[in-house]
Amino acid sequence: MDILIYGIINSFSLALMAIGFTLVYGISRLPNFAHGALYVITGFLVWSLIHLLKLNYVISILLALVIMGLIGAAIYRFILIRVRGMATSEIIATYALGLAILEFLRWGGFKGMTYTLPVFIEGSVNIVGIPVDFQRIIVIAVGIVVVSFMWIFTHFNKTGLALRGMAQDEHAAMMLGIDSDWMAVIAMAMGSILAGIAAITLLPLGNIVVEAGYNVLILSIAVCIVGGLGSWVGAILAAFMIGFLQIITVAYIQSHFHMVVALLAIIVTLILRPSGLFGRQKELEERV
Amino acid sequence: METTDKRKERLDRGIKVRTEGIYAISSWEEMSYLLLPRLVLIVGLLLLPLLMPSLYWNRVISIVGIYALLALGFDFLAHFVGLVSLGGAFFVGVGGYTAAILNKSLGLPPLLSIPIATIVGATVCTLLLLPALPLRGVYFAIVTLMYPLVFLRIIEALNILGGTDGILGVASFPSTWMEQYLILFIVIIALFGLRRLVNEDIGLVFRGVKDNDQAVRASGLSITLYKAIAVFITSALGCLGGAYFVHIYMVAGISLFALDYSVIPIAATVIGGGGTLVGPLLGCFILVPISELLRAFGTLRIVFYSVILLAFIMFRSEGIMVYAQRKYHQFERWVKV
């Protein structure tokens, strides 16, 4: 029973981490290797707003999310736009950016002392005899809200529909008057905000550490590959698969294999179904 | 208004025939024009250890050599085969640990353990990267990014291979002169060997894999096989570097998977000029000594390279060497349009 409950919680955490990455990749075909860095930045940003500027928790969260959106837009507008279309340069640029941010935070004194964010609501509740604290329930709630918001946004909103158009066929979308760069700016901003939301919901469960940036990057990449790069439904399903696999591994084998599960999932997927669970239409394009 | 109707005209020198790398030379002058840069490079490399002020800087020469191997491998893989490897540290780690195990448990001397570790390590790396090879796109970059991070976690968590302490007491080289000259010779051989390789038939296939993989497949050649050969070459260079590193510092620890080995080669390639193979070498000779000077700053060094890398890729993505070659091989003049 606790496998079921913690499996669901873990799956929603993974889905939250991965959805930003998959959004950016799906729309502008940019592998955002700075995703983990954006996640960690949000944590430190909220912490600094609370402790250095003495702001209210809720206000600092909202402020941090706005700043994250601006950062994401700025990253595309000032950096990625220059290397757009050159696959090698795109990969190297986002990778360098992510490393620069993470290692700067590591150097810049955000170490040693423990940095934590307060949980939203203290206390825990018993679900069929297993104590689950409120924060973990909030993770599930936020997960459901974010996923359904994304679904509604991309199906019933003009901007959302334009984003989907870009994802499906860039040239056709441009012919219909959709600005490719502007959409990519929006996608990048939303991706950063989603990374921020993930950070704000998940970080109160533990300390803010720089290492988390690399872990989040690895996990979200794993989820995206298993689900099919750029496919949102696939990403959510894959989050559940990897989430439960991880919890089962931790429960029955050893907790150290936590990370290995993600790697094995990627490799098995690449061998058996390189396009992932939901990438069928792209299969011909990807396998050479 | 005067300047707008002029443009810069670029003319190749007369000895160049049709394409890159083919020359018609008819005098000693022209021959020396071609030989000079190559001789300057080789003689410069060989004189370098003699010019160093202290033992510390002699050690830096060896480290530069190791990074040069990694950067050569990266440049070859990225600009001739089209695979971007973000995990140079993975090759270093596998090669280093293999050499350390060979040396400690089988008692092999460095001159035996390094070549064996190179071959064995390259085989292991190629096999582990094989699942990502039949695919186009970012998969290779993603998988190479993950491997060093995950291997680091596995070694830490399971406490295998000496855990966080590493394998201590690996044999060192008999003398520092041998240590430097061996790596410099290897670098020179790797540089000229790769230059030759990419102009052979197989190099043509590699470029075909990069530019138009369907055409390669239509010619009845297996893309996966050629990618695997290229990955083998690159990981052999990386593993060689790793094995060398272990024997220089006499320890194989988890620092072999450090990010430096992934970032510096990429930065060196971008700064030096991708696709030239000499450029990465030059980049290493610029970056690694700076990195030694900045040793006191800890992880800020990685920030430093990443920012340089970002700046170069945004504003000067051709790199130093491409620029220098253009200036050397072509006349430029302003002409009226």
Image (cartoon, rainbow, N blue to C red):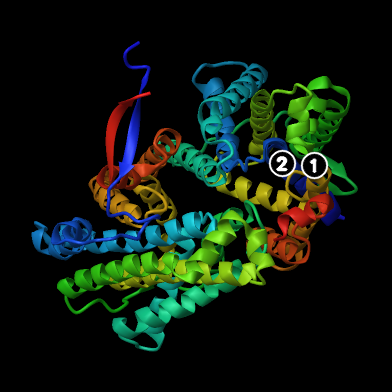
- In the picture shown, does residue B196 fall above or below A145? below
Pick whichever, A17 or B199, lies toward us.
B199
Q: Position of residue A85 (x, y in %)?
A: 59, 39
Numbered tag placed on residue A232 in the rendering: 1
Residue B203: where, in percent of width, then height?
A: 48, 66
Q: Is residue A234 visible?
A: yes
Label 2: few (<14), some or many (≥20) within 10 Å? Answer: many
* First reached walking from the N terminus: tag 1 or tag 2: 2
Q: How far across and down, in percent of the image, does residue B268 sit? A: 36, 50
Q: Secondary structure at mark 1?
A: helix
The residue beneath circle 2 is A22
Q: Chain of mark 1?
A: A
On the picture, is B278 further left or further right than B61?
right
Q: Residues within 10 Å of mark 1 (few under 14, many from 20)?
A: many
Q: Quadrant of residue A170?
A: top right
The residue under label 1 is which amino acid type?
Answer: Trp
Q: Chain of mark 2?
A: A
Quadrant location of the N terminus of chain B in the rendered image: top left
Q: Are marks 1 and 2 in contact (CB under 8 Å)?
A: yes
Under mark 2, the amino acid is Thr
Q: Look at the picture and state if A74 lies above or below B311.
A: above
Q: Who's the residue at 66% across and 56% down the image?
A: B136
